[in-house]
Amino acid sequence: MIPMICRHERLPHTFVLRTEQWIDAPREQVFEFFADAFQLEAITPPWLHFHVLTPRPIPMAPGALIDYRLRLRGIPIRWRTEIDVWEPPVRFVDRQLKGPYALWEHEHTFEDHGERTLMRDEVAYRLPFARVLGPIAQWLMVRRDLEQIFRYRAEVIARYFAPDNSVGQGTERAAIANVTHAPGSVE
């Protein structure tokens, strides 16, 4: 899985990140994993210090608001997203309301292929001050950071759903469970 980033076809100063990943699990199981916003803590690289701030449970539906905290290059950031589309187990879309981007719309889709699922991510994003700093920041930092984040995410997801991989699967599932469900993990 290599994230592909290109310019948006219609929106000026906007980029699109696209990924595809085959997951060795049925679509309903994969969607259930992603329906839990707290799984983001486990599939986000540790260097971002990412935490979900919204208390459990988060009822997922259009209009659901989710607050996060992270550190980007040492700078503390608060991020709020809203679920715009919720169509289990096919797709959902989250949109940034507050955060580091001028635009962030992330569509997650899940295609059923029997015991496997093809998961796709498409993120349309625009940087603040896009006309002035956007191209420079995009090529110097943002593109590289997003590629690293989505590669890390793909590796964790692959290990989590690995069939008959008792070391990776058991260890990763336990680690994810501990990270996302540990008391006090959300500050």
Image (cartoon, rainbow, N blue to C red):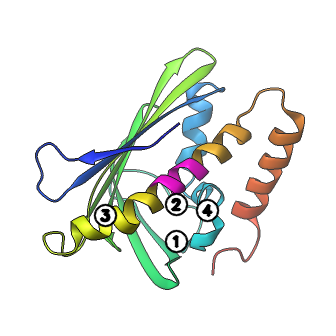
Give the amino acid at mark 4: Pro
Q: Earlier in the sequence, mark 3 or mark 2?
A: 2
What's the residue at 60%, 74% (across, down)? 49
The disc label shown at residue 58, or none: 2
Depth check: 18 or 162 in front? 18
Which dot, 3 or 1, sits closer to the camera?
Answer: 3
What's the residue at 67%, 47% (across, down)? 156
Residue 149: within the magenta? yes
Discs 2, 1 touching: Cβ within 8 Å: yes
Which dot, 2 or 4, sits closer to the camera?
Answer: 4
Judge left or right: residue 105 versus residue 48: left
What's the residue at 76%, 72% (across, down)? 183
Residue 93, compared with residue 100, is above or below; it is: above
**Measured Cα–Cα span from mark 2 to mark 1:** 7 Å
- On the question of residue 102 being in view, the answer is no
Depth check: 128 or 178 in front? 128
Q: Earlier in the sequence, mark 4 or mark 1?
A: 4
| Residue marked by disc 1 | 54
User: What is the span of residues highlighted in magenta in the rendered image?
Assistant: 147-152
